[in-house]
Amino acid sequence: TAAQVSMSESEERRKLAGTTNEIQSLYGELDKAYAENKENFDKKRWDEWSGEWLRRANAQAQGYSGTGIVSLYPRAHSRLEACMHQLILLHTAYSLDLTAIAQKDGGKENERPYSPKLEPQSLKDSIDTGLAEARKEIPLAAAK
């Protein structure tokens, strides 16, 4: 019925909004932890924090990795899935960067140990764009 369709649409919008907020939260936590550790890197502390953060991020990503997911908002869903994967890649890039900074020789930073695909600013730009586009698409789709 029309009421069931409307409820399904509303529920999916809430789920997508919740996912967007969770990704934004994980993203903010990662940036904050990176900034704090960049100033005073403690590998043990980073590894402990990192393990818990990765468990949460991977749990969120698993909800988007399954086959057979049908979405009323496929573009927003796809963008959020990509954001989750890029967020995990950003964590990897930050971890490599912190390790490189910790291992610098005589004040000279080592060359960054990752490929251009793991360039932090590029990943951040992509995540920011994906989140913004997903936020735009959900209300627009709901108005139709």
Image: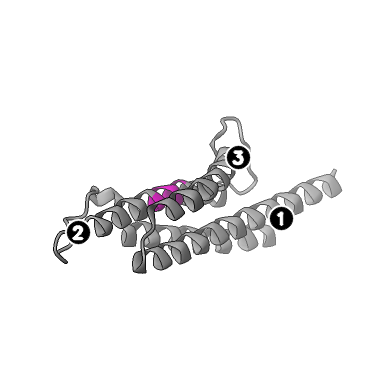
Judging by the rendered image, the residue that carries numbered circle 2 is: 104
Q: Nearer the viewer, residue 58 or 9?
A: 58
Region of the chain picked out in magenta, as a range: 85-91
In whole angstroms, how far apart are the C-alphas of marks 2 and 1?
Answer: 46 Å
Residue name at image x 24 percent, y 48 percent: 114
Judging by the rendered image, the residue that carries numbered circle 3 is: 63
Label located before the other in sequence (3 or 1): 1
In whole angstroms, how far apart are the C-alphas of marks 3 and 1?
Answer: 15 Å
Residue 137: x and y in percent read: 57, 59
Q: Secondary structure at mark 1?
A: helix
Label located before the other in sequence (2 or 1): 1
Q: Quadrant of the C terminus?
A: bottom right
Q: Secondary structure at mark 2?
A: loop
Vertical placement of residue 17 versus 84, above or below: below
Residue 21: x and y in percent read: 61, 60
Residue 81: x and y in percent read: 51, 46
Residue 86 tag number: none
Report if residue 7 lies within the magenta region. no
